[in-house]
Image: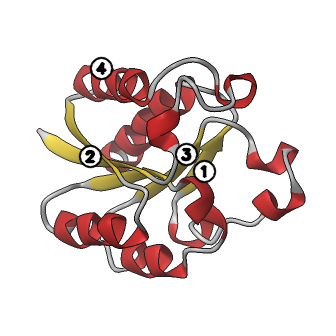
């Protein structure tokens, strides 16, 4: 079994109640469960971690080196300015997939820039809970075809 690390950034612990018109009513636990089921269906295991702290996410990225085959990350607001997370991800030796529940490109202009995208093999955005499933599928496809 190969391991995928799923990281969720700030305010994603409020999913289900935070701006349901944008993020839906599924909780973070619902999203993680969908991703875990998708991972198992393609022969992977998934470990999830959420933090409102960039430093905690960076520590998890550092710890993932040599332990995880890939990282899937929903950086939340860190998407737009957290160069320290970008630097940590660039030092990771496996593929990184950026995911978002909403589509940042269809929202406020400050959300149109991702500092994580340059160190990711791809970005999946705007598909709600399905974004997490599609992220797992993208990682599995990438790892099985390289």
Q: Residue shown at 40%/36% (left/top)?
A: 136
The residue at which mark 3 appears reads as: 99
Mark 4 or 1 closer to N-term?
A: 4
Residue 24's quadrant in the figure? top right
Residue at image mark 2: 4
Residue at image coords 27%, 20%: 41
Pinpoint residue 62: horizontal percent, then vertical percent. 24, 73
Q: How far apart, in angstroms, are the residues tagged by discs 3 and 4?
A: 17 Å
Picture coordinates of residue 100 (x, y %)?
60, 43
Q: Quadrant of the N terminus?
A: top left
Q: Which residue is mark 4?
A: 37
Residue 144 visible somewhere in the drawing? yes
Kindly indicate whether the residue at mark 1 contacts the one at mark 2 (C-beta within 8 angstroms). no
- Look at the picture and state if 120 lies above or below 25: below
Q: Are marks 3 and 1 in contact (CB under 8 Å)?
A: yes
Residue 134 vs residue 22, the one in the foreground: 22
Question: Within 10 angstroms of label 3, few (less than 14), some, or many (20 or more) residues?
Answer: many
- Contact, mark 3 vs mark 4 (Cβ under 8 Å): no
Is the C terminus in the top left, top right, bottom left or bottom right quadrant? bottom left
Check the image and report above or below for 45 versus 139. above
Crowdedness of circle 2 by 10 Å Cα count: few (<14), some, many (20+)? many
Mark 2 lies on a secondary structure that is strand
Q: Tell me if label 4 and label 1 are in contact, CB under 8 Å.
A: no
Residue 57's x, y, as percent? 34, 64
State the image coordinates of residue 134 (x, y, percent, origin top left).
51, 32
Name the residue nearer the viewer: 91 or 59: 59
Q: Label 3: state its secondary structure.
A: strand
Residue 146, visible in the rendered structure: no
Instruction: Give how far apart the Cα atoms at labels 3 and 1 are.
Output: 6 Å
């Amino acid at each position: 079994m190969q391991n995928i690390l799923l990281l969720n950034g700030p305010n994603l612990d409020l999913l289900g109640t935070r701006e349901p018109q944008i993020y839906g009513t599924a909780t973070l636990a619902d999203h993680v469960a969908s991703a875990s089921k998708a991972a198992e269906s393609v022969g992977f295991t998934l470990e999830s971690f959420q933090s409102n702290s960039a430093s905690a996410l960076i520590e998890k990225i550092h710890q993932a080196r040599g332990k995880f085959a890939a990282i899937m990350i929903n950086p939340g607001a860190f998407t737009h300015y957290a160069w320290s997370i970008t630097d940590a991800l660039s030092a990771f030796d496996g593929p990184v997939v950026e995911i978002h529940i909403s589509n940042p490109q269809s929202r406020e202009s400050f959300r149109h820039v991702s500092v994580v995208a340059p160190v990711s093999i791809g970005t999946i955005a705007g598909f709600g809970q399905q974004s997490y499933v599609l992220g797992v599928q993208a990682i599995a496809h990438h790892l099985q075809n390289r």
